[in-house]
Image: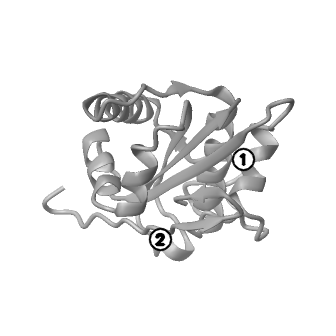
Amino acid sequence: MATRAVRLFALAASVCGLLLVVGPAGATADRPAAAMRTLEQGVLSDMNELRRQHGLAPLRLSNALSAAARQHSTEMAAKGYFSHSSSNGSSFDRRIARFYPMGRSKYWSVGENLLWSSPDVDPSSALKMWFDSPEHKRNMLNARWREIGLSAVHVAAAPGTYGGREVTIITADFGVKR
């Protein structure tokens, strides 16, 4: 990582009581961005260790939140943008709710951390970048979260915001329903 610049763009805001932590050559309909399961598993393990160190319960991996995260990472890679909002302008909580609905729960809340980096980013580097951002750190150490969905995708030549560079995009979607 010493020879490669690592980029982290953070967006954070509080919206309606919900916490917002807020066609490239490498990702097309015929050739999707490569998923990086090992990186995702490492981020989950490292995040749960960080939470344990702060006296917090570990997060359970949620298939629904992971589907929301994967859809968003893949869409950002394919369309060359980096934002908590979807490409159609809808807010992150509306996007996540399509995969992780409130159902019969009386309480529902979601949050999101994003990053894009050089392709060699590892779990500890990803968590350090988020930890160094007050909004992202707050999200990782939020005691109310019970579940997490993770998606890491690799793109050989990402368009738009990414300037044609080879990048890895990570989305972490946090949630709780009671």
Q: Is residue 41 above or below residue 30?
A: above
Question: Which residue is at the front of the view, 33 or 7?
Answer: 7
The quadrant holding residue 123 is top left
Q: Residue 96 got which mark?
A: 1
Residue 101 x %, y %: 80, 38
Mark 2 or mark 1, whichever is nearer to me: 1
Q: Is residue 67 left or right of residue 13?
A: right
Q: Earlier in the sequence, mark 2 or mark 1?
A: 1
Residue 33 x %, y %: 57, 47
Badge 1 amino acid = Ile
* Residue under the point 26% across and 51% down: 128
Question: Which residue is at the front of the view, 109 or 170?
Answer: 109
Residue 78 x %, y %: 64, 60
Badge 2 amino acid = Tyr
The quadrant holding residue 166 is bottom left
Q: Is residue 120 visible?
A: no
- Identity of the residue furthest to the front in this view: 106
| Quarter of the rendering occupied by the C terminus | top right
Between the residue at mark 2 and the residue at mark 1, the CA separation in whole angstroms equals 24 Å
* Residue under the point 56% across and 75% down: 160
Please tell me whether mark 1 sits on a helix, a strand or a loop: helix
| Quarter of the rendering occupied by the N terminus | bottom left
Q: Is residue 102 left or right of residue 176?
A: right
**Label 1: few (<14), some (14–19) or many (≥20) C-alpha neighbours in 10 Å:** many
Task: Provide the residue designation for mark 2.
Answer: 162
Q: Is residue 165 visible?
A: yes
Q: Is residue 89 left or right of residue 51?
A: right
- Identity of the residue furthest to the right in this view: 104
* Residue under the point 73% across and 38% down: 107
Please tell me whether mark 2 sits on a helix, a strand or a loop: helix
Residue 24 x %, y %: 59, 63
